[in-house]
Amino acid sequence: MPRPTRAQGRPGTRVFPKNWETEHAVVVRKTCTALIKIWAPAPAGVAPTNDQSLAPTPVDVGEPLYGGADGAPARIQVLNAQQGTSEVADQTQVTAGYLVVIDRDAHDIPPRAVVQIITSTDPELGGSTRLYVDHHDRGSIRWERDLYCVDDLSAIRTP
């Protein structure tokens, strides 16, 4: 007997096997070539100093949201479509977008969180390089957690 035109397999058969995400996430972890820590967003604000200049308000950053004391693996890619320049106080300011891929089981990372790149196979990314989370992807089928970051805090969309 021929199969019906709109047949979608046997009744009760899953489209994706039960452990499909976790088993494939192992492959994504093998692509990580950087070590990072992610810190909670610092509260905005400045405080006047004795010479009437403005200095950032000191912030206790506490424990990292991701990466622990030694950092955690990540993959970092520049997103050419999110690059731009602007003029601020007669100076050209360049903003570049980055995709930072972390483990799929990582907790939610809030917008404006600080991504500190500890080491990377790219010699220009590492040490003191900091990115700021703009937004992240969500989904019910995923192998990784994708964070879209910028290197300039002024480029982050305000809620």
Image: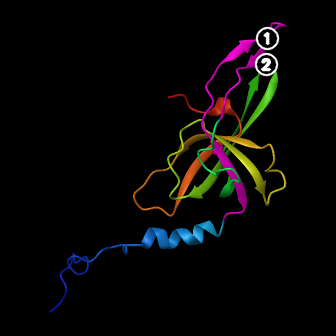
Left or right: 10 as drawn, with respect to 51: left
Dot 2: element:
loop
Say above or below: 33 vs 49. below
Mark 2 burial class by Cα count in 10 Å: few <14, some 14-19, many 20+? few
Q: Quadrant of the N terminus?
A: bottom left
Apparent side of residue 93 relative to residue 40 in the rendered image (left or right): right
Magenta-drawn segment: 32-61
Q: Is residue 50 above or below residue 76?
A: above
Amino acid type, callout 1 = Thr
Tell me the residue that label 1 is attached to: 49
- In this view of the protein, which residue sits in the foreground, 6 or 118? 118
The image's mark for residue 75 is: none
Q: How many marks?
A: 2
Q: Residue furthest left?
A: 1
Residue 104 colored in magenta in the image: no
Magenta: main secondary structure equals loop
Q: Position of residue 103 (x, y in %)?
A: 56, 59
Residue drawn at x 71%, y 24% is: 58
Q: Which residue is mark 2?
A: 89
Q: Secondary structure at mark 1?
A: loop
Residue 87 image offset from top left, x and y in percent: 75, 25
Residue depicted at 49% across the width and 73% down the height = 23
Q: How is the image coloured?
A: rainbow
Query: Residue at the spot x=80%, y=7% of the render?
Result: 52
